[in-house]
Amino acid sequence: MADNFQKIRLLGSSFSLKIDEDPDYFKSIITSLEKMFSKIEQEMGVRNPLRIAILSCILIQDELLKEKSGKSGSVKNNDAEKVEKMTLEIIKLIDEAL
């Protein structure tokens, strides 16, 4: 497949990426990220783009590690609350460092 440049806009930033993937597949990735960002913004009340990106990375990494270890499936409410609490603590530490 020929190299392809795709322009994207996420969290207020625009840029072009050179991709080797099918453009439709790449667009599905971007759409998935947009949905995740929107969900975090709505459910957690987070408005800062950096915070949204960090929370998204944490959630994606959690999902990836669970999938790799064969522990995929729904997260228990207690676990979700722990993850949310830890995430908010990480954001607080980041704010203090900035």
Image: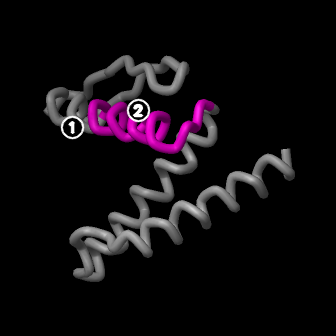
Along the line of sight, which residue is nearer the eye, 34 or 88? 88
x 46%, y 25%: residue:
10
Q: Quadrant of the N terminus?
A: top left
Residue 38 in magenta?
yes
Along the line of sight, which residue is nearer the eye, 21 or 59? 59
> In this rendering, is residue 14 above or below 49?
above
Q: Which residues are magenta?
A: 30-47
Q: Tell me how many marks there are.
A: 2
Q: Which residue is mark 1?
A: 21
Residue 38: give its label. Answer: 2
x 63%, y 32%: residue:
48
Give how far apart the Cα atoms at labels 2 and 1 are. Answer: 25 Å
Residue 37 in magenta?
yes
Q: Position of residue 36 (x, y in %)?
A: 37, 40
Along the line of sight, which residue is nearer the eye, 6 or 31? 31
Residue 41: give its label. Answer: none
Q: Position of residue 72 (x, y in %)?
A: 24, 73
Question: Circle 2 — which element?
Answer: helix
x 54%, y 21%: residue:
13
* Of callouts 2 and 1, the N-terminal one: 1
Question: Circle 1 — which element?
Answer: loop
> Is residue 86 shown left or right of residue 41?
right
Classify residue 3 by image quadrant: top left
> Is residue 61 shown left or right of residue 67?
right
Of the residues shown, which amino acid type is indicated by label 2? Answer: Ser
x 64%, y 56%: residue:
88
Which class describes the residues within 10 Å of circle 1: few (<14), some (14-19), or many (20+)?
few
Q: What secondary structure is the magenta-colored segment mainly?
A: helix
Classify residue 74 by image quadrant: bottom left
Which class describes the residues within 10 Å of circle 2: few (<14), some (14-19), or many (20+)?
some
